[in-house]
Image (tube, rainbow, N blue to C red):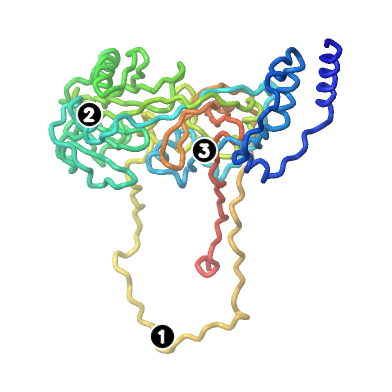
Amino acid sequence: MSSNHDDLSNRLRHSLDRGAAPELSPELVTEAGTRPAPHMATPGRTLRIAGSAGLAIAAVTVGALVVVPALSPRAPLFTAASASSAPLGARDAVSSSMKIGWWVDYHYTAGASLSTEGGSGQVYRLTVDGSDPEERTAELAAALGVDGTPVKADYSDETYPTWVVGPQDGTAPNVSFSSYGTGDWWYSDPAASPVYVCDPSVTPEQSTEYGCVLPADAPANLAPSADEARSLAQTLLASTGYTVDAADIDIYADDWGTTATAYLSVDGQRTALSWNVSWTNTGELSYAYGHSVSVQAQGTFDTVSPAAAVDRLSDGRWFGSAGPDFQGGPIMFATDLARDGATEVDAPTDAPTPAATDAPTETPVPTDIPTETPVAPDDSTLVPVDPMPEPTPEFVEVTVDNATATLVLLWDVDGNAWLVPGYAMQMDEGWWNSVVSLVDGVIALPEPMEIEPLVLDPEVTN
């Protein structure tokens, strides 16, 4: 009996070495469910087969009947928005670091110090809190002390639904809530103006801020101090649903007032999404803004190495907004000052005054006006005019020697906000650039933006 078992085991093992299983026709596979199940004539004998022989029979059965379908690639999480085609909220948040590359063409090269090892990182989606925008608007109004009933804003539409409490003509405080994107809300009190006199006659030597001066009888700056502003901002933001430690609030103060700024922190990293509270030098709350979002983890995904990510710096579709720790440096970028907290920009306040001349004030009327119709010149008399040369960009070679892993803010084509793994890289001049580090395929990119060369009409230039 033992020899029979050994012989059966050997034959079964030998049957497994016959090569690949025969290819089954589609008809056989699709109609298998309609066929009667086979019945064993002597089930008792089968049950008495034990040990490796029984396992071998199971293996043969599985190998012969299981058809493994081809694995389909995972669909992208979302399609990233381009700066030109992004919805309103997305365009507002295309960051302080978006480079203007019209006249300078940067060529980036990874330095020898950059790692060539990839990694992984968590992706987060930011979703708007609350399913009832009217209710959310009423909550914000109550927190910010604005009386009234939420109504659709005059500029609200299906794409950008916005609700408001208070007058929309700037005559009194109001608060608005946008139930899309990151659930932006905004409070403003038009009466809380700083005490300044702004007069075109003020000379640059007299000016202290933007062509304006404090009047001689102006009271002392009543805006809260740094510590007071942190405490007040922490309490106000908590009333709107956003909790932040006072120590994590940044303060900027000048003669105009005091501004407190907090950032959404995820995984211990400050991101590009900010909340802001500002008081004028009268001590009054001038404006405040923030968001109504929840952070939802979407899974962990592979990332490219820092060295590989350098190749993405030249492709703006990979750009992502990094947090405040990776901003600043010389103004070499297009910057949204209101969102990104920049404080000063030197700009001329007065139009230049034309120089005095001895030219007559009245235009003389010519007396020798010809009465005959002029004859068009022959083509042979025309002097050819060379077309204006096309602008040539300046080429700059940049070697990138540092890359810090961080979360970057990205928007999709539907106006939703995401936090995805990225790298922040500081250039030699001090400015930062940041790109998404997810491997290809995790997100879909928009079509590349093509910039057509400037073509001048010869008839116009002539």
Depth order, front residue of 286/65 = 65
Q: Check disc 3 and give the amino acid type.
A: Lys
Q: Residues within 10 Å of mark 1 (few under 14, many from 20)?
A: few
Task: Kindly indicate the quadrant of the structure image that contains residue 150.
Answer: top left
Task: Residue under label 2, please give it.
Answer: 140
Q: Nearer the viewer, residue 352 or 451?
A: 451
Q: Height in image: 272 above or below 168?
A: above
Q: Position of residue 132 (x, y in %)?
A: 26, 34
* Residue at the limit of the structure toward the top, as seen here: 2
* Label whose residue precedes the other's in the sequence (1 or 2): 2
Q: Residue at x 67, y 46 (%)?
A: 27
Give the residue displayed 50% in from the left and 28% down from the top. Answer: 420
Name the one closer to the observer, 308 or 350.
308
Residue count near mark 2 (Cα–Cα under 10 Å), binned few <14, some 14–19, many ≥20 = many
Q: Nearer the viewer, residue 377 or 142?
A: 142
For residue 270, say whether it is visible. yes
**Residue 410 appears at what percent x and percent y?**
47, 34
Instruction: Judge from the rendering whether residue 69 lies leftward or rightward of residue 225; answer left or right.
Output: right
Determine which residue is flagged by label 3: 99
Mark 3: give few (<14), some (14-19) or many (20+) Cα within 10 Å. Answer: some
- Asked if the residue under mark 1 is in contact with the one under mark 3, i.e. CB atoms within 8 Å, the reply is no
**Residue 370: numbered disc:** 1
